């Protein structure tokens, strides 16, 4: 019993040390809880940020794919435009004369007769000059249809803008077609004899 009392007296003498120890343990517990809570919140924030960045990366990849497809289409279009300028559009000389020759050739192959042709010029913003030609052609219905088809399929890029059918003035079975077409030349001055 005396040993127990001496132990209790000894503990009472060291009470101040135990209080410091208890305070240190409590401070450690609070610090541990705070750090653990902060790390858990940080982990949640990092997971949310990772999900947001993954979604943003997916969106950016889709935009990049669309831009790459658009760039490829633009490249193909640019090549088509260069080909149009290089292969289809010709200089005023001899382009205008060659265009009239081709119209005459197509009319002859289609068995239609072309009348006097009038034309007007218009300079476009692109640097091209648009030539609009108006001409009467005469023949039977199927020959006129064949002529229009050949005009539209010509490599010279004739645009059939307007057609109007009327009875031929000669009074036979022929039909007269008033035809308005357009084609393009590289801008420039035509020679005095370049008209039809």
Image (cartoon, rainbow, N blue to C red):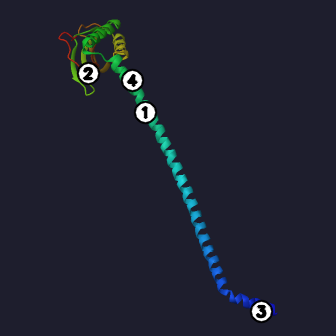
**Along the polypeptide, which appears first: circle 4 or circle 2?**
4
Residue 176, position as x, y percentages in the image: 27, 12
SS label for mark 1? helix
Residue at horizontal 58%, vertical 59%?
Answer: 43
What is the CA distance from the residue labelled 3 to the residue labelled 4? 108 Å
How crowded is the residue under tag 1: few (<14 C-alpha within 10 Å), some, or many (20+)? few
Pick the front one: 65 or 109:
65
Q: CA distance from mark 1 to mark 4?
A: 14 Å
Identify the residue under disc 1: 71
Circles 4 and 2: CB distance less than 8 Å?
A: no
Q: Which residue is mark 2?
A: 130
Q: Is residue 174 visible?
A: no
Residue 9: image location, x then y, percent: 73, 91
What residue is shown with label 4?
80
Return the residue nearer the eye: 23 or 134. 23
Q: Which of label 2 and label 1 is nearer to you? A: 1
Most extreme residue toward the right, as rendered? 1
Local SS, label 3: helix
- The quadrant where residue 168 appears: top left
Residue 171 x %, y %? 25, 8
| Screen quadrant of the N terminus | bottom right
Front tag of 4 and 2: 4
């Amino acid at each position: 019993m005396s040993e127990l009392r001496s132990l209790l007296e000894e503990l009472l003498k060291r009470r101040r040390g135990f209080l410091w120890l208890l305070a240190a343990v409590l401070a450690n517990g609070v610090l541990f809880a705070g750090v653990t809570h902060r790390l858990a919140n940080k982990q949640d924030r990092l997971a949310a940020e990772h999900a947001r960045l993954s979604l943003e990366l997916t969106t950016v990849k889709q935009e990049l794919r669309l831009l790459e497809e658009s760039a490829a289409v633009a490249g193909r279009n640019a090549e088509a435009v260069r080909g149009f300028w290089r292969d289809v559009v010709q200089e005023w000389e001899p382009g205008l004369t060659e265009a009239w020759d081709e119209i005459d050739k197509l009319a002859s192959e289609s068995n239609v007769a072309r009348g006097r042709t009038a034309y007007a010029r218009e300079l476009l913003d692109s640097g091209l000059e648009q030539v609009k030609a108006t001409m009467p052609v005469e023949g039977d219905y199927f020959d006129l249809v064949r002529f229009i088809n050949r005009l539209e399929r010509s490599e010279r890029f004739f645009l059939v803008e307007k057609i109007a059918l009327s009875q031929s003035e000669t009074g036979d079975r022929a039909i007269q077609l008033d035809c308005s077409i357009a084609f393009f030349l590289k801008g420039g001055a035509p020679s005095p004899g370049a008209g039809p």
